[in-house]
Image (cartoon, rainbow, N blue to C red):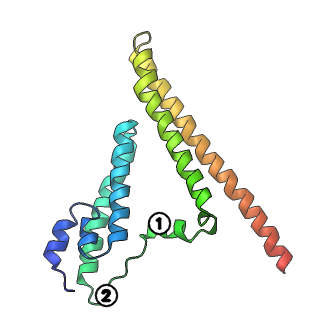
Amino acid sequence: MKHSKRVAIFFSLMPGAGHMYLGLVRQGIQLMLLFFAIIFMSASFEMEFLAVFLPIIWFYSIFDVRLKSLKEDPLIDADLPIFADVASMKHFSNSSLVEKYIAYILIVMGIFSMINNLIIPVLSRYIDYYYIRCFKSLVISIILISIGAFMLKGKKSKIKSGDTLCNQEE
């Protein structure tokens, strides 16, 4: 099916919609999910630094749709490059492990939401807002650093066990 380049670029102004117009539904959904998840997280948890990624995703969407609308051969609806590595990991094929990672993400988001919507309003009655904001930033930073360290620790142990497997095969 021949797609109009102008219509595709018009739809690409909303990240993911241009891909869906071209028939790349999986890529479109992934782009929309990424775009709106960043908006949600930066607004809900006051992590404004995440908004830096919004123009990157937006421009990627526009230029990728433009490039794909110029192609004559049929388009293949595969994962976006950012999600391709995740899909190829063998340990993600276990559905219970995927559910475990989603559970971790939901727990962290719940903690951030509880800090923002319950603890901060209660503390603001007794403590100056400047100190509350510093405390909130400290707690969120510690949580993010802990998650990152936990993930790196898990990767190092997998790499070490993978190295011993390679050495045993030789």
Specify the quadrant that holds the C terminus. Answer: bottom right
- At label 2, the amino acid type is Pro
x%, y% of residue 70? 23, 83
Task: Tell me: 79 left or right of 86.
Answer: left
Task: Tell me: 168 left or right of 43.
Answer: right
Q: Which residue is mark 2?
A: 74
Q: Which residue is mark 1?
A: 83
Seen from the viewer's position, the closer of residues 67 and 30 is 30
Q: CA distance from mark 2 to mark 1?
A: 21 Å
Seen from the viewer's position, the closer of residues 1 and 121 is 1
Query: In the current view of this chain or complex, which residue is farthest to the bottom?
Result: 73
At mark 1, the secondary structure is helix
In the image, residue 122 above or below residue 62: above
x%, y% of residue 33? 36, 57
Q: Residue at x 67, y 58 (%)?
A: 155
Q: Residue at x 56, y 46 (%)?
A: 104
In the image, residue 89 above or below residue 47: below
User: Quick one: label 1, few (<14), some, or many (20+) residues within 10 Å?
Assistant: few
Q: Which mark is residue 67?
A: none
